[in-house]
Amino acid sequence: MRRRTTPESTPSPRPWNAALDGLGFGGDYNPEQWPQDVRLEDLELMREAGVNVLSVAIFSWATIEPREGELDWGWLDETLDRLHGAGIRVALATATASPPPWLTRKHPEILPRLADGTVLHQGGRQSYAVTHPVHRDYALRMTTRIAERYRDHPALAVWHVDNEIGCHVPRDHSDAAAAAFRDWLRERYSTVDALNEAWGTAFWSQRYGSFDDVLPPLTAPTFANPTQQLDFHRFSSDALLDYYRDLRDTLREITPDVPVTTNLMATAHCRGMDYFAWGPELDVVANDHYTMSADPERHVDLAFSADLTRGVAGGAPWILMEHSTSAVNWQPRNTPKAPGEMLRNSLQHVARGADAVMFFQWRQSRAGAEKYHSAMVPHAGRDSDLWRDVVTLGRALRALGEVRGSRVRSRAALVMDWPSWWGSELDSHPSQDLRYMDQVQAWYRALWRLGVTTDLVPPGADLDGYDLVVLPTTYVVTDADAANVAAAAERGATVVVTYFSGIVDESDHVRLGGYPGAFRDLLGVRTEEFHPLQDGESVRVVGKAVGGQASADLWTERTRAADGTEVVASYEDGALAGRPAITRREVGSGRAWYVATRLDDAGLGALAELLVAEAGVGPEVAAPTGVEVVRRWSDDGATSWLFALNHTDADATVGAPDSPVAGVELLTGDAVEGSLVVPAGGARVVRAAG
Ligand code: GAL
């Protein structure tokens, strides 16, 4: 894989929103789906809503180049000129998100493959092998053409590389991928002996004599080598990132001052790409998030995605590149959003660091696979509640323009780690029921319910500013990361580690001498055997730390606490009755807790409350259950904007005598003194001094 940009040669482009007054507002714009009269009406409607940024040409390759070498730029020239005339800025895509039919017919070898050899054909979208040199050449050619044509266009604000790279094909098993995997392994291990050592190939006669014998983990008679699987995850994320970088570098060569991004899918549902490695490669991080209509706590899932995006952006403001105005079309049952939900969703993203709110898509398609997906302009047209809500949202975002550039501050960190996600869920493990994200989300939810603003960070992050650090199922741990976590406790933080953490090193080799190897000394515990529970089985956990008594399932461990380690909760029944379930140890100026089982919601809630109090990271402002309060701060800390989002169907009051809210409410212009009323399902934003 090519690496062309070195850190020294990295240009510093202008900010993506240099030409905007406040926050960005808009969506994906696909005028190629519509006749001229509709395109003209679009401009009128965009003005009415206050749209100021649009993503253009994402899926336009086949429109721009319907036959190889035959280029039709007319419609795109006209679109950009018109948008510029209307004062709208453009996130211009490389048009590479889906290869045109002529390309896959001419070069069927660029089609991706599943592990069982199934070819993913043209006819949907994203049917390309991200590592195939032929596809890469064509994609770079299209990128170059677009960049050269529009390099000086005054509407151009930011380049939008491809689209949701890896969305449908996070891992490709084609011959091109196999060759690229071997190159990646050569770079990682240098010698085949080192690969054999890392992969533990003395087991099951898997020893390789040459890199040429290595394949991706294809469908096999039984479990594929676990380190091969883990490395293939790493490789696949890197291969997709390499594709992004290659297109980005081409754009940078032509327009060094134009920032480059791509829309990530940093959510609890996107396992394929290690976005902590991607973030630094984007000039501004952009993310897509869709709520799951069947999830009654979808606003918590949204908060998680927004916080993860901020973590990937290293705390900097980011672009919400896509979400939906109402229903989507790809869930089993697609319920529309409730009245007020779109506005609340949008402001929730802003509260957690977004400087732009964009949608898929501007106008709801009348043909194609996404015609039942909501948009800013619905099938019903302008005379619709949805359109009126879009106009209201535009107005709200204009009123909030001053928050742009401000940042969220947090003293609680939840460690999120893609290698642990991949590694902990491999086959041939103690329990097939363990789901990494389920633990991460359970802890996130518990902290969210307590009103704690949480940063999502990788295990190697600078943990200095955090008083609470939680590591849920952090399975793959390097020595350096283990030392980083231990240092946080020494320095005074409350560190919490949960079951099946610290088990293996980066090669997926077990750390010997008792689990959880990497954290055994820090936590002062030693587990001799895992004791996963059968489906439907649960045990009782007793102790003040879980509110007296709680239920636990999925996982237990035969754990012993070392001298000096306090057992704060134990199992009351089951095979491990009397054994420690939760322990606590004083470490330097801080503390290290181990939670060896999966607690039910109430137990985890009680424990989280205790930890939040111990670490002193509780919310600054009192709010009733279901009302979310988050603050953004100006750089100098002189001003803050307090966002209050009422996810309940009753009016709520935020702020109490000991945590008053005072300032100006920006959506209504009202002065606020002491407490703030947030209408049922509504949102309020108060500018406060400090
Ligand atoms: C995203 C994608 C958009 C659109 C949207 C529908 O994954 O980037 O093009 O398909 O989903 O929800």
Image (tube, rainbow, N blue to C red):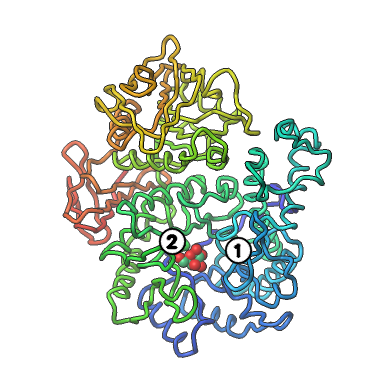
Determine if the C-beta at disc 1 is less than 8 A from ligand 1.
Answer: no
Sequence-earlier tag: 1 or 2: 1
Q: Secondary structure at mark 1?
A: loop
Q: Which residue is mark 2?
A: 356
Side of 143 where 625 appears, left or right = left
Residue 410 vertical placement versus 40 (above, below)? above
What residue is drawn where x is 67% and y is 47%?
220
Q: Amino acid at mark 2?
A: Ala
Question: Quick one: label 1, few (<14), some, or many (20+) residues within 10 Å?
Answer: many
Q: Amino acid at mark 1?
A: Val
Question: Quick one: label 2, few (<14), some, or many (20+) residues within 10 Å?
Answer: many
Cα distance in 3D space between marks 1 and 2: 18 Å
Q: Nearer the viewer, mark 1 or mark 2?
A: 1
What residue is drawn where x is 75% and y is 53%?
2
Image quarter for residue 660? top left
Most distant residue in the front direction: 221
Side of 587 where 197 appears, left or right = right
Indicate the position of residue 415 as horizontal and vertical percent values.
48, 37
Q: Which residue is mark 1?
A: 161
Side of 380 where 247 appears, left or right = right
Give the camera-side residue of 104 and 608. 104
Q: Secondary structure at mark 2?
A: strand
Residue 106 vertical placement versus 188 (above, below)? below
Indicate the position of residue 613 as horizontal and vertical percent values.
30, 28
